[in-house]
Image: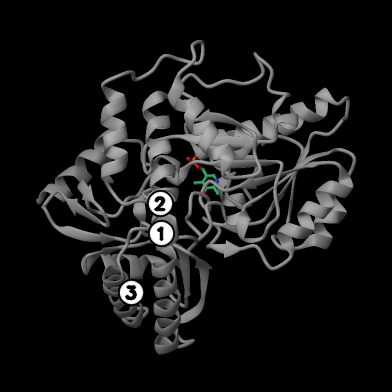
């Protein structure tokens, strides 16, 4: 039994069985590479499920983390801590929002946004409590976020769900309009559906939702937990459309792998979160907030976001020519922008994922037939080429 198999056996003895990981134990990461317990190196095109936007152990984030670790780890929100104030200032400068609330995960960020939508209506004396969400959406595993998630398989056995949530087909403005009423508190939508298969909003969809929300008087929430922080090209995916939400949620890449979530909003909406309404013990934790500020600074002032446009083009061309060579008998469609992509296959993604790993490249799925790529923005053209060539062979090996 090698060290990977040993850890797999110990894992199944000691952890609840809700994960079924690929059979390697990752010990170390550096840039776009990770190393398993046997010292084998892999090119990481999954990036910790779209978290490691700057690659593993990025020196700027590592420096921020160790510097903060020598000063203060945690003090709670009963005291003021500067890292979360500084992070809030950075984030609000980059988008529509004026205020931030920090938490520890994407699900928590969405909980905060959905709760705030109800509370905001309550404070205005309106009987709005319904949430309109979309089929195929993923918003997290806590009960409110789960109830907004648009894949019934995730709900099974956890009912009753939070009441007042309606789902309509992603991209369908007419269906959305039909479900809106004077009971609607908010529409929640991913500008690019991530877990649902890397599906960018169809042209005009976000604009249409903004217009419907304005007309109806409800709030518009963009879940950018996966699409935000430069992942799809701009700092936030919705900025490609020019449409602004009333609330936005972030997590995955915000801390480059350190757990942190954020809910951002306009001051007029945020005003409803008066003392006592909502909180998180670890929210805005100094270690996590310092890392997230280093991520933002490296992306913006460090130029990584701008430089990533070049490798995004490389991904565009590489994926397109790969799909052409493989043909429609293998590839249904290639989707996504920036450093978040999916290749929809004619075969189960699991086969391709296994073959890629055996050839030293890590990819993940997003639904049964989609292989998802979420590499770091610092990936080099050579690494893109290496990764896509392994992926192409893995797909070409077919269904057997
Ligand atoms: C991953 C994800 C979530 C949930 O984030 P967790 O940190 O796992 O709670 C929510 N929304 C979207 C769009 C996601 O991709």
First of labels 2, 1 by sequence position = 2
Residue sitting at x 68%, y 67%: 202
The answer to whether residue 118 is left or right of residue 34 is: right
- Residue found 47% across the figure and 66% down from its top: 341
What's the CA distance linking mark 1 and mark 3?
A: 13 Å
Q: Earlier in the sequence, mark 1 or mark 3?
A: 1
Q: Is mark 2 within 8 Å of ligand 1?
A: yes
Left or right: residue 294 compared with residue 43:
right
Which numbered circle lies on residue 388? 3
Q: CA distance from mark 3 to mark 2?
A: 18 Å
Residue 157 in sight from this viewpoint: no
Query: Percent x, y for residue 266?
Result: 70, 35
| Location of residue 392 by image quarter | bottom left
Look at mark 1 in the image and give the residue it sits on: 374
| Residue 49 disc label | 2
- Give the residue furthest to the top: 78
- Whether the residue under disc 3 has CB within 8 Å of ligand 1: no
The disc placed on residue 362 is none
Residue 261: percent from left, percent from top? 50, 36
Location of residue 239 (image quadrant) = bottom right
| Label whose residue precedes the other's in the sequence (3 or 2) | 2
What residue is rendered at 87% in x and 30% in y?
127
Residue 304: percent from left, percent from top? 39, 55
Residue 243 visible to an observer of this rendering: yes
Q: Is residue 268 above or below residue 213?
A: above
Examine the rendered structure and indicate whether residue 234 appears above or below residue 293: below
Question: Viewed as shown, does residue 385 lie left or right of 372?
Answer: left
Q: Nearer the viewer, residue 364 or 221?
A: 221
Q: Are marks 2 and 1 in contact (CB under 8 Å)?
A: yes
């Amino acid at each position: 039994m090698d060290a990977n198999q040993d850890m797999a056996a110990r894992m199944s003895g000691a952890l609840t069985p809700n994960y079924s990981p690929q059979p390697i134990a990752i010990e170390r990461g550096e840039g776009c590479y990770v190393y398993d317990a046997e010292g084998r190196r892999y090119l990481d095109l999954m990036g910790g499920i779209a978290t490691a936007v700057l690659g593993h152990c990025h020196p700027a984030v590592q420096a921020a983390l160790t510097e903060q670790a020598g000063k203060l780890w945690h003090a709670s929100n009963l005291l003021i801590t500067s890292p979360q104030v500084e992070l809030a200032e950075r984030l609000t400068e980059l988008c529509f929002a004026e205020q931030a609330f920090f938490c520890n995960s994407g699900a928590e960020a969405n909980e905060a946004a959905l709760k705030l939508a109800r509370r905001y209506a309550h404070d205005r004396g309106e009987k709005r409590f319904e949430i309109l969400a979309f089929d195929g959406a993923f918003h997290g595993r806590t009960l409110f976020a789960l109830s907004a998630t648009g894949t019934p398989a995730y709900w099974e056995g956890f009912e009753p769900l939070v009441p007042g949530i309606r789902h309509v087909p992603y991209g369908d403005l007419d269906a959305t309009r039909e479900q809106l009423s004077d009971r609607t508190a908010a529409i929640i939508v991913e500008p690019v559906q991530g877990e649902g298969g890397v599906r960018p909003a169809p042209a005009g969809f976000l604009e249409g939702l903004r217009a419907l929300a304005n007309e109806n008087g409800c709030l518009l929430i963009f879940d950018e937990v996966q699409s935000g922080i430069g992942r799809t090209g701009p700092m936030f995916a919705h900025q490609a459309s020019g449409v602004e939400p009333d609330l936005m949620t972030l997590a995955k890449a915000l801390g480059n792998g350190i757990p942190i979530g954020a809910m951002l909003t306009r001051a007029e909406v945020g005003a409803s979160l008066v003392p006592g309404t909502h909180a998180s013990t670890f929210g805005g934790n100094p270690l996590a907030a310092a890392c997230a500020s280093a991520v933002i600074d490296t992306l913006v002032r460090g130029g990584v976001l701008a430089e990533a446009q070049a490798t995004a083009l490389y991904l565009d061309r590489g994926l397109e020519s790969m799909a052409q060579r493989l043909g429609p008998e293998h590839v249904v469609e290639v989707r996504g922008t920036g450093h978040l992509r999916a290749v929809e296959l004619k075969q189960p993604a699991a086969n391709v994922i296994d073959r890629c790993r055996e050839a030293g490249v890590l990819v993940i799925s997003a639904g049964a037939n989609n292989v998802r790529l979420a590499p770091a923005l610092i990936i080099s053209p050579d690494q893109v080429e290496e990764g896509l060539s392994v992926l192409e062979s893995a797909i070409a090996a077919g269904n057997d």
